[in-house]
Image (cartoon, rainbow, N blue to C red):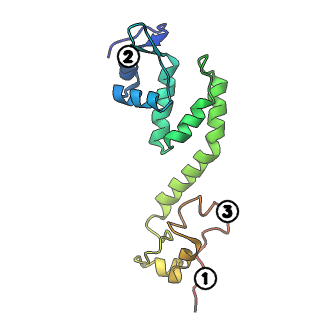
Amino acid sequence: MTKVAWNTRELTVGQLAERSGVAVSALHFYEAKGLITSRRTAGNQRRYTRDSLRRVAFIRLAQRIGIPLKTIKDALSRLPDERTPTRDDWAQLSAAWRGELDDRIEQLQRLRDDLTDCIGCGCLSLDRCPVANPYDRLGDEGPGARRIDTRLCPPHPSCCVPPAEVP
């Protein structure tokens, strides 16, 4: 990897790609979607400020945990364009996502812990499903995996308790 001087204020697209580990085409895509910005030189070459490294790292991490690009763009739009975001700027952004991330964590834990049990999808193909979801009662609530999806079954003590079996 080519070492970029620590005090370099702007990076070429190649330097940003190499330092961030993201393909040039992905950087162009992020720019087209308004996730990052660049200025153009007199020779029409892109130049990115160093804070673009953090923005790209944030985008990649957010994508990796399943956050849609529109949500990422909305979050990044709250950061200042005229200066490098401060620690406080990033703290405010992360605080805004805390609830959503907590929900994702809860959902992943349910998936990990309950995938071998009835998840309320209506298949009734596991031995446990006819006991936990007799006659596909959870289907009356709507489509999908009713017991695992925290948007459908928020975590609280009375939620997702198997219904009583019908005589």
Q: Quadrant of the C terminus?
A: bottom right
What residue do we see at 43% from left, 9% from top? 41
Q: Nearer the viewer, mark 2 or mark 3?
A: 2
Amino acid, disc 1 = Ala
Q: CA distance from mark 2 to mark 3?
A: 48 Å
The crowd level at tag 1 (other Cα within 10 Å; few <14, some 14-19, many 20+) is few
The crowd level at tag 3 (other Cα within 10 Å; few <14, some 14-19, many 20+) is few
Instruction: Please name the residue that numbered disc 3 is placed on.
Output: 156
Which badge, 1 or 2, comes first in the chain's sequence? Answer: 2
What residue do we see at 47% from left, 29% from top? 57
Q: Quadrant of the N terminus?
A: top left
Q: Nearer the viewer, mark 1 or mark 2?
A: 2
Number of disc labels: 3
Q: Residue 144, percent across and down?
A: 50, 66
Which badge, 3 or 1, comes first in the chain's sequence? Answer: 3
Amino acid, disc 2 = Gln
Foreground pick, 144 / 6: 144
**In the drawing, does residue 4 fall left or right of residue 99?**
left
Are the residues flagged by discs 1 and 2 in contact, CB closer than 8 Å? no
Q: CA distance from mark 1 to mark 2?
A: 62 Å
Instruction: Please name the residue that numbered disc 1 is placed on.
Output: 164
**In the drawing, does residue 6 fall left or right of residue 138?**
left
Instruction: Please name the residue that numbered disc 2 is placed on.
Output: 15
